[in-house]
Image (cartoon, rainbow, N blue to C red):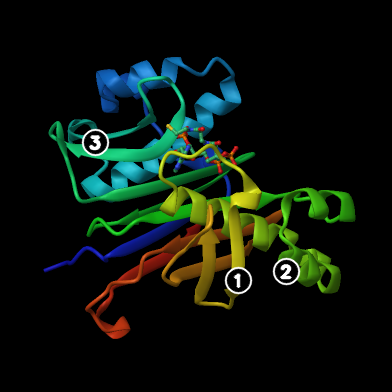
Amino acid sequence: MTSVPNRIVRYVGDIRRLPVTEPSAWLTAAERHELDFFAHEDRRRQWLAARWVAKRLVARSCDPAQLRRVEVLSRSPAGLGQAPLVRINGELSAYRVSLSHAGDATLVGLTTDAAAIGVDLAWDVPQDRQFSAAWFTEREQAWLAERPESASLLWGLKEAIFKSQGAGQPWNPRGVAIDSYCDHQVRCTLFGRPLSPLATWIRPAARGTATAVWQPPQHDSPAKVEQELSSCL
Ligand SMILES: CC(C)(COP(=O)(O)OP(=O)(O)OC[C@H]1O[C@@H](n2cnc3c(N)ncnc32)[C@H](O)[C@@H]1OP(=O)(O)O)[C@@H](O)C(=O)NCCC(=O)NCCS
């Protein structure tokens, strides 16, 4: 018997190598409508690649009919970006998904138990003082003064936290204040509200950092939490 891990983070370094097939066969009508929102070919390719990975992780199949049972939508009725909602056979599911795109890379995070997750691929984040002063808190600026190369890590954490824990606010990097972080945990304040510590997965990526944060389970011991954190291509 195989079991599905509670958390999956999948990094794909080159989406052009994914075996993505004809979209009309594996997208729902609502997904095709969302895809039509994007005119630019690169953005459409990113959107499709992340859907392909996310839907395959949920369906655990690459059969187009199985993929079409899973629907991943990420736009509000007003057309603004929002945390993706996952439906299976038209019903909202306990799966939570987070997506990030950068060039030809994609990062997909998934939880199977309704725990909020956020992922971000932070590439080419400026390391100069002007950028730091504009978007980072004083504590973060002090870290950056010592280690400018951690700009993509801090930026990625901010975006991943916002995607995981945001409640419909517009994105503002200063709205996410990182209080402390290490390899496996981040403490932060979101729009003035201190959050419980979040678990982290942080890896160097081609032009920056790949980051995932999620709500750690309340009751399970860490040893009981199954995780699949992987990179491919
Ligand atoms: C979150 C955000 C800053 C990420 O932008 P980015 O760094 O350029 O892009 P990334 O590739 O890392 O992430 C894009 C993905 O984030 C997800 N996303 C978008 N908005 C999100 C939000 N508010 N919360 C969680 N995830 C969000 C989407 O899945 C999107 O990918 P998709 O369009 O292919 O589905 C940007 O999408 C944003 O500003 N969103 C908020 C829009 C808004 O104001 N919404 C109001 C609430 S309805």
Residue labelled with disc 1: 179
- The first of marks 3 and 1 along the sequence is 3
Q: Is residue 13 visible?
A: yes
Badge 2 density bin: few <14, some 14–19, many ≥20, Cα 10 Å: few
The residue identified by callout 3 is 67
Measuring 71% from the left and 60% from the top, which residue is drawn there?
137
Residue 67 picture quarter: top left
x, y percent for residue 53: 38, 44
Q: Amino acid at mark 3?
A: Leu
Q: CA distance from mark 2 to mark 3?
A: 45 Å
Mark 1 or mark 2, which is nearer the start of the sequence?
Answer: 2
Count of numbered badges drawn on the protein: 3
Q: Is residue 128 left or right of residue 191?
A: right
In space, the residues marked 2 and 1 are separated at their CA atoms by: 8 Å
Q: Tell me where residue 193 appears, x and y as whole percent.
A: 48, 59
Circle 2: element type: helix
**Label 1 amino acid?**
Asp
Residue behind label 3 places its C-beta within 8 angstroms of ligand 1: no
Q: Which mark is residue 139?
A: 2
